[in-house]
């Protein structure tokens, strides 16, 4: 299956721990997007990355959150010192041509902070 | 006011009915996407539009760039179409509508 792969699918963390979410885009795709869906809320854009570059991080909280998409390997969304309000589903999508390209979504990673 | 407005918020239909979901937006866009999110939470991209009209099976999506409006139509609706349909407008970032929760009853 050459689709967008996210892992882990479910992650449980205690307050103060770190959460790392991984996204492997579709083969050949160099554009990756991260979105967050809080419980009972809509999707919110977080960050848009190309290989080794952050293109738009206007949706990222200023503190504790970071994202990268290295030359080799998956994109990583990192949340430091998690709080209960970080509990959400985090979706990754990839495209081959950026904002004018078709998007393919991963199944999401569901983070629960105890 | 949200930059992407969808209507209706909730929609219940009988199997076989023709369904329309509307989306209006107020920002400049490179493309507009219609997404489907099933109760399990997974998201599928149904259409990506920058102009005109697209059709896939029983689904039709249209966009009017001048009026900043798009519609998603489902013909001969079926219970398996029950899901949340989300309109999203795309530049570098992406702005999402709140979604339309569709329930199709047999």
Image: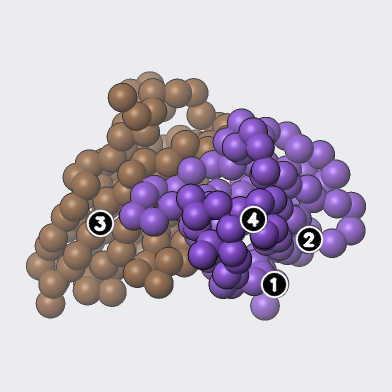
Discs 1/2, front: 2
Q: What residue is drawn where x is 36% and y is 41%? A: B97
Q: Which lettered chain is shown in purple?
A: A
The image's mark for residue A16 is: 4
The image's mark for residue A27 is: none
Q: Earlier in the sequence, mark 4 or mark 2?
A: 4
Could you tell me which quadrant the C terminus of chain B lies in?
Answer: bottom left
Q: Are marks 4 and 2 on the same chain?
A: yes
The image's mark for residue B101 is: 3
Q: Is residue A49 above or below residue A107?
A: above
Q: Which lettered chain is shown in brown?
A: B
Q: Chain of mark 3?
A: B
Q: Are marks 3 and 4 on the same chain?
A: no
Could you say whether the residue bearing mark 3 is in a helix, strand or loop?
A: strand
What residue did someone put label 2 on?
A74
Q: CA distance from mark 1 to mark 2?
A: 14 Å
């Amino acid at each position: 299956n050459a689709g967008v792969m996210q892992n882990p699918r479910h992650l449980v963390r205690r307050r103060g721990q770190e959460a790392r979410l991984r996204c492997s885009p579709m083969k050949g795709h160099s554009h990756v997007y991260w979105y967050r869906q809080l419980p009972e809320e809509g999707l919110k854009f977080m960050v848009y990355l190309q290989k080794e570059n952050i293109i738009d991080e206007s949706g990222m909280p200023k503190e504790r959150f970071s994202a990268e998409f290295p030359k080799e390997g998956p994109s990583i969304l990192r949340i430091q010192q998690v709080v209960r309000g970080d509990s959400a589903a985090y979706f990754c999508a990839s495209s081959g041509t950026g904002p004018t390209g078709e998007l393919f979504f991963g199944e999401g990673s569901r983070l629960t902070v105890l | 006011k949200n930059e992407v407005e969808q209507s209706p918020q909730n929609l219940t239909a009988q199997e076989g009915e023709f369904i329309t979901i509307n989306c209006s937006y107020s920002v400049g866009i490179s493309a507009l996407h219609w997404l489907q999110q099933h109760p399990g939470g997974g998201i599928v991209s149904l259409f990506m539009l920058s102009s005109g009209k697209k059709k896939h099976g029983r689904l039709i999506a249209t966009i009017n760039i001048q009026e900043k409006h798009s519609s998603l139509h489902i013909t001969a609706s079926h219970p398996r179409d029950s899901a949340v349909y989300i309109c999203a407008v795309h530049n570098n970032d992406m702005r999402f509508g709140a979604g339309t929760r569709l329930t199709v009853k047999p």
